[in-house]
Image (spheres, rainbow, N blue to C red):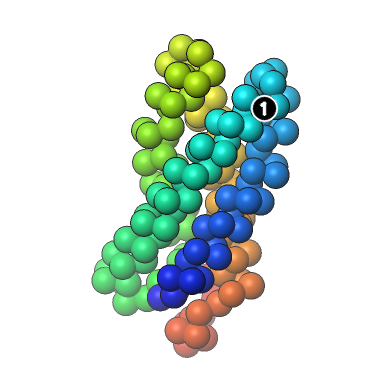
Amino acid sequence: MRSPLDRLRHALSFELIALLLVVPLGAFAFGMPLQDIGVVSVVSATLATLWNLLYNWLFDLALRRTTGTTLKSPRIRLLHAVLFEGGLLIVLMPFIAWYLGVSLWHALVMDLSFALFYMAYALAFNWAYDRLFPLPEWQKAPQA
């Protein structure tokens, strides 16, 4: 399994790169001021980072317990991304509605849009991260 320091590097790099992408894209897509989307994105990223640390640790524990390894197949990677974003969606939607002064429906649409972006981004980022920083235990298993 990954060390706490490696998990911190993973979570912080994930969120920093995502912010560089999502703030300008979100402001453009929703026609809102960059600073408003920036605040929503930074708060969301902070909550997501905390969730990321906890969720990935728990997911890896469960995966290792059920399969004997933390190596993720494409199907497991998809499940990982969907469950992560689903949990985050529940927490972020009320904050988005409150801060931007929009209806819960509008916040849901925005949150789902962000979630779709982040799901695709998480899949690509995590795959790349695992290739850049492979664990020694994966040398014994075929690459997924």
Residue 80 vs 60, above or below: the answer is above
Residue 14 vs 63, above or below: the answer is above
Nearer to the camera, 133 or 120? 133
Residue at x 63%, y 32% (from the top left corner): 38
Nearer to the camera, 43 or 11? 43
| Residue 57 screen position, x and y as percent | 36, 63
Residue 29 visible in the displayed image: no
Residue 116 vs 144, above or below: the answer is above
Residue at x 67%, y 35% (from the top left corner): 23
Disc 1 residue type (three-letter): Gln
Question: Residue furthest toward the left?
Answer: 65
Residue 34 vs 105, above or below: the answer is below
Residue at x 72%, y 33% (from the top left corner): 24
| Residue 95 screen position, x and y as percent | 44, 26
Residue at x 42%, y 58% (from the top left corner): 53
Question: What residue does disc 1 label?
Answer: 35
Q: Quadrant of residue 116?
A: top right
Residue count near mark 1 (Cα–Cα under 10 Å), binned few <14, some 14–19, many ≥20: few
| Residue 88 screen position, x and y as percent | 41, 40
Secondary structure beneath disc 1? helix
Task: Answer left or right for 60 relative to 36.
Answer: left
Residue 3 visible in the displayed image: yes
Task: Answer left or right for 123 relative to 73.
Answer: right
| Residue 120 screen position, x and y as percent | 58, 46
